[in-house]
Image (cartoon, rainbow, N blue to C red):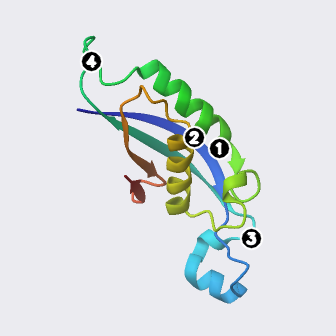
Amino acid sequence: MRLTRRYPFSASHRLHSPALSDEQNREIFGKCNHPFGHGHDYVLEVSVQGQVDAHGRVAPIEALDRLVNGEIVSRYHQRNLNLDIEELAGVVPTTEVLAAKIRERLAASWPAEFPKLDRIRIFETERNIFEIA
């Protein structure tokens, strides 16, 4: 059985690599390379997979919410991903990179008694959705 919970947060970023020229950055990242950055209203989905317990639940939802809100939402919400998030320092904070970093952070603090962390999905826009298992 899989349980998926959604967690909205808003953050800004600029897609820009100092290893590239300004022209190369504009070619690769287009409007996402705007010098002042831009923001997104992200929706993070966290999915767990496991057996239904004796209480008819896959996971303790309140505990899962506390973990995700504490480790991710409170850390990223209303932040500049380029400047405010330590694990994104020195990398281009694409949503692909963001998804991988969020998964790493959750996995590092995942309680042993929780069901398996199955996947992370981030909706950047209606058309851009990134998933990592």
Using the image as rendered, state which of residue 31 and residue 16 is in the foreground. Answer: 16
- The numbered mark, 3 or 1, whose residue comes first in the sequence reads 3
Name the residue at 64% across, 81% down.
Answer: 25
Distance, label 1 to label 4, CA atoms, is 32 Å
As helix, strand or loop, the secondary structure at mark 2 comes to strand
Query: Nearer the viewer's eye, disc 2 or disc 1?
Result: 1
Q: Circle 3 — which element?
A: loop
Q: CA distance from mark 3 to mark 1?
A: 21 Å
Three-letter code, disc 4: Asp
* Residue carrying label 2: 9
Residue identifier under label 1: 76
Q: Residue at x 55, y 24 (%)?
A: 66
Q: For mark 4, what is the residue?
A: 53
Question: Total number of numbered labels?
Answer: 4
Label 1 or label 4, whichever lies nearer to me, is 4
User: Which tag, 3 or 4, sits closer to the chain's start?
Assistant: 3
Tag in front: 3 or 1: 1
Dot 4 falls on a residue whose secondary structure is loop
Q: Residue furthest front?
A: 112
Q: Quadrant of residue 55?
A: top left
Q: Mark 2 vs mark 4: which is more N-terminal?
A: 2
Give the residue type that dot 1 points to. Tyr
Report crowding for label 4: few under 14, some 14 to 19, many 20 or more residues within 10 A (C-alpha). few
In the rendered structure, which amino acid carries the disc numbered 3? Pro
The reply to whether dot 2 and dot 4 touch (C-beta < 8 Å) is: no
At 71% from the left and 85% from the top, the residue drawn is 22
